[in-house]
Amino acid sequence: MTGTRGSIHLKTVKKDTLTVVGDLPSPGWWNGDTVRKIDNGYEFCMAADLAYRAGLPKLTVRNVSFDALVAGKAQDFDMALAEISITDERRKVVDFSAPYFASNIGVLVRSGSKATQDNIADLRLGVKQGTTGADFVRDKLRPKKAPKVFAGDVELQAAVQAGQIDAALTDVAIVLGKAQDSGGKFKVIGQYDTGESYGALYPKDSANAAALDGAIEEMKKDGTLGKLASAYLTRAFGGDPESIPVWSTK
């Protein structure tokens, strides 16, 4: 833990507990085969550190679908950490912290794929429901065939593996982790610069927003988040995200 225990005060949904929800697990961010077995990762440790700074002895982690999170349908939680891109549309139903991680859209394919920047719009593409990746494919990439929409990362990855789709497009920070865990079955061949960033998601008009924002900003300044990225994301990505070629939609 870093920072000072009890340096912020939170009014939590459950006494003495910080309740954090997300679309779990997620390599590098929430590591573990099941929600109960998650014990490390960038966002897991970020949540644990926030609980420590709030002087809370307990951290509860709960799985919620990504679509429900960004639609403002999740209930009884203090914050969500799930690699959630900040958008004006989502701000209509939820609130966000200041950005804590920049993210682009990555292209995940099977090893040996012939997909390229030039032919990507001709292929069978897959996206995750409710994500900015899905919006990007629909509005910017505009493939000839409507992309297939999947409920979560697991289903999206399985569709690539089964050959149901030629490429999966979602956050590069997520697909790099999938490629790293695949034992050489998948690779990330390109990324699109969207200028987006992840933020912690709060219930609309949360009374804890200011305190959590302050703590997150402090974690950026004191190097905590940088250390978590080095410890968990570099290993999960299997390389530097900036080394992935940046593609154009034109």
Image (cartoon, rainbow, N blue to C red):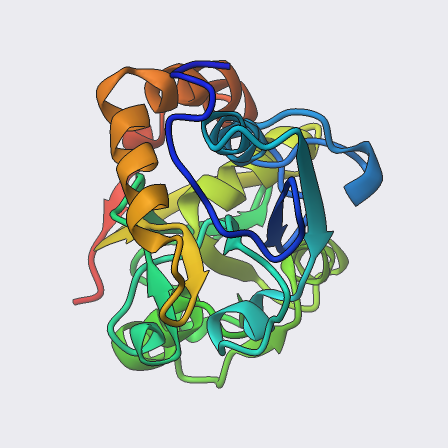
Residue 224: image x %, image y %?
37, 18
Taking the image as shown, residue 240 lies to the left or right of residue 71, namely left
Residue 55 or residue 140, whichever sits in front: 55
Is 70 on the left-hand or right-hand side of 48?
left
Q: Is residue 118 above or below residue 150?
A: above
Q: Is residue 119 left or right of residue 157?
A: left
Q: Nearer the viewer, residue 11 or 119?
A: 11
Residue drawn where x is 50% and y is 48% of the image: 81
Query: Which residue shows up at 63% across the image and 55% down it?
Result: 23
Q: Is residue 239 visible?
A: no
Residue 180 can be seen, yes or no:
yes
177 w.r.t. 113: above or below:
above
Residue pictured at 39% horizontal, 79% vertical: 93
Q: Is residue 107 above or below residue 206?
A: above
Spot occupied by residue 247 in the image (x, y as percentages of width and height):
25, 51
Q: Image quadrant of residue 172?
A: top left
